[in-house]
Amino acid sequence: MIAINARMSGFVIAEALVALLLLALTLGLSAGMFGFARRLSQAGHGRDVLAQTVAGGGALGGWLAAAAPIRPATPAGPGPVLFEGRPDRLTFVTASRGDVQPAGLLAVTVGFNGRDRGGPTGSILFDVAPLPVGASLLPDQVARQTLIARVAGARFGYFGALREGRPAAWHDAWTDATRLPQLVRLRAELDLGGRVEPLDLSFRVPGS
């Protein structure tokens, strides 16, 4: 009887060890699967950010390619070109064919908002509004949308000659100029789900 009880105890201990081993293997596999799923999610999020960045960069490039070098008339002659570039934003006039935005001349403002609702990253936003002709804009005529999201930092630069007879160079700001810049540069840092990648884009302005 003692021998049978000893054998039964041995079986119970062996079964408990096997159960613990299976539990450890199951937990290990689960942790590995969770980690793999998280990496897949981060990789997918990074692809989404990159896809939006490509689309946003293409839209900005298209608007700048159609920028209009308009200089309002003043008593002293033509005034500065309607283009205001700052390190954190730029505003210019572009011509739309009516494919996505209303046809005609549009005022476009693109800027970095710094942070989205106190989060770690911000967005590059754009406002598009038809130029008013004889009347002020209605509130619903201005559309604000996100151009590029998950932006940790962004800065614009401008290349060209601000005035006639000046040498072409890179500038942090483009204001009160008599012509459009030749190039607009956007340097940004994108948050691709746990890692920050630099982004360096340059856009040509044919009407300069």
Image: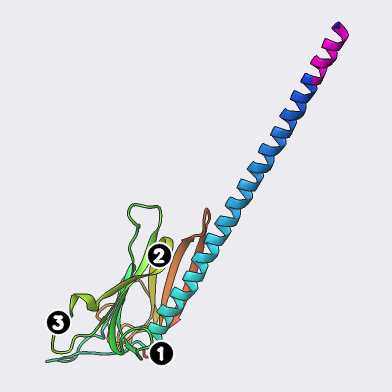
Residue 187 versus residue 10 in the image, above or below: below
Q: Residues within 10 Å of mark 2 (few under 14, many from 20)?
A: many
- Residue drawn at x 44%, y 61% is 150
Q: Nearer the viewer, residue 24 or 158?
A: 24
SS class, disc 1: loop
Tell me, for residue 206, which label it has, or none: 1
Q: Locate residue 29 relative to residue 131 in the image: left or right.
A: right
Q: Locate residue 131 relative to residue 165 in the image: left or right.
A: left
Task: Report the residue marked by disc 3.
Answer: 136
Task: Give the residue at the far top of this rendering.
Answer: 2
Tell me, for residue 154, which label it has, or none: 2
Labels 2 and 1 touching (C-beta < 8 A): no
Q: Residues within 10 Å of mark 3 (few under 14, many from 20)?
A: few
Task: Give the residue at the far left of this rendering.
Answer: 75
Residue 174 versus residue 32 in the image, above or below: below
Where residue 69 sits, quadrant-wise, is bottom left
- Residue drawn at x 34%, y 87% is 67
Q: Nearer the viewer, residue 88 or 99?
A: 99
Spatial CA span between label 2 and label 1? 24 Å
**Which stretch did the figure color magenta?**
2-11
Where residue 104 sits, quadrant-wise, is bottom left
Q: Nearer the viewer, mark 2 or mark 3?
A: 3
- Residue drawn at x 86%, y 6% is 1
The mark that comes first in sequence, 2 or 3, is 3
The x and y percentages for residue 88 are 33, 67
Spatial CA span between label 2 and label 3? 32 Å
Q: Which amino acid is tagged 2?
A: Ala
Q: Which amino acid is tagged 3?
A: Ser
The x and y percentages for residue 179 are 31, 87
